[in-house]
Image (cartoon, rainbow, N blue to C red):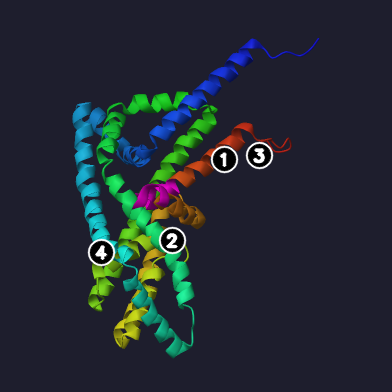
Amino acid sequence: MQHQIHPNRIRQIFFLSTLIFIGLIILKEMFFMLGAFLGAITLYILMRNMMIKMTTDWKWKKWLAAITLILISFILIVIPTAWIVSIGIDKIKPIVQNPSEISKVFEQIHQYLITSFDLDILNKENVTKISSQVLPMAQQALASTLDTLGSLFIMYLILFFLLFETLKVEKWIRHALPFKDHNVQLFMHGFRNAVYSNAVGIPIVAIIQGIVGFIGYWIFGVNEMVLMGILTAICSVIPLVGSMLVYIPIGIYMLSAGNTWEGIAVLLWGFILIGSIDNVARFMLQKKMSNVHPLITLFGVLIGVNLLGFLGIIFGPLLLSMFILLVKIYMNEFGKVDATNPEVII
């Protein structure tokens, strides 16, 4: 007798195909809300325990507790971030629109390196290559950042309902995830750790390095010290090189301008203080949250900036971390199990 597909299997395939088709349409049309959605999820994870405490222990009304937490997050996170971003945009926008100004700085550094050390690393060809890679990314970041600021209302609207229905939301997620109970727990735990590592760990380390950098630039008379401090914080998320991308060119530029001791002081401040702060802060934070591999941070930032602008520095690594977590869960669910060791997935 010829093998036939059971009607239930046909209906299942048809239903899943329809569901995926409609889901892709919805995702395509709502992609502009990705930053707002990720922001709401991140803030929800950070506020969840306090929301439960306020409503359960302190007996607050759910709507009042949710609005209070939203206002606190707006004052402590959104306003300072918006201020820093606005300063960065005001300072960087003229450079992006007129790259010749930064080219003059590179040329001065190039001449100094050629004269003093016979190093031909910042010639016109190399500077052109750097500009062709960095400037489009900077332009994309500026444009996307303006769009992100406009999605704050959507983010807080989503966050309000998440906080208001905290327990129901988590119960629904646990039942909706198509995983075994063990992998549901793994997903919830891994997602929470990823949020804390990327949304808390990365910004804290960046802010500390930016402040330390700003103090040094202020002491040694660096021009545009606020902008340089912001750039130091931003570049600190890049593995291996990090904030060296800022303080080394500043130090060399000051040396090339004849400010010898100031340039040396900036370089020493960067290598000794800014660099060591990164290691100390990360070591202390890793006691509270999981470690993020440097490559996840690097590729996550590149992906995030292209997708979400400035906020992609945080959410890009988070997206990549979640993708890797889902791959691990998939292997747990469907991978081949070593018969000699059931804990090992082949």
Label 3 close to label 2 by CB (< 8 Å): no
- Indicate the secondary structure of the residue bearing disc 2: loop
- What is the magenta range? 306-318
Residue at 69 percent of width and 14 percent of height:
5
- Indicate the secondary structure of the residue bearing disc 3: loop
Which three-letter amino acid code belongs to the residue tagged 1? Lys
Task: Quote the CA–CA distance across marks 3 and 2.
Answer: 32 Å
Residue placed under numbered mark 3 in the picture: 345
Depth check, front residue: 176 or 65? 176
Above or below, 211 against 268 in this view is above
Label 1 close to label 2 by CB (< 8 Å): no
Specify which label sits upstream in the sequence, 3 or 2.
2
Residue placed under numbered mark 1 in the picture: 328
The residue carrying pointer 4 sits among few (fewer than 14), some (14 to 19) or many (20 or more) residues within 10 Å by Cα, namely: some
Indicate left or right for 202 with 8 as reference: left
- Indicate the secondary structure of the residue bearing disc 1: helix
Specify which label sits upstream in the sequence, 1 or 3.
1
Tell me the mark number nearer the camera, choosing from 1 and 3: 1
Tell me the mark number nearer the camera, choosing from 4 and 2: 4
Estimate the x, y position of residue 223 in percent, counting from the top left: 25, 75
Residue placed under numbered mark 2 in the picture: 238
Residue at 35 percent of width and 57 percent of height:
139
Q: Using the image, tell me which numbered label, if any, was put on residue 91.
A: 4
The residue carrying pointer 2 sits among few (fewer than 14), some (14 to 19) or many (20 or more) residues within 10 Å by Cα, namely: many
Chief secondary structure of the magenta portion: helix
Task: Quote the CA–CA distance across marks 1 and 4.
Answer: 42 Å
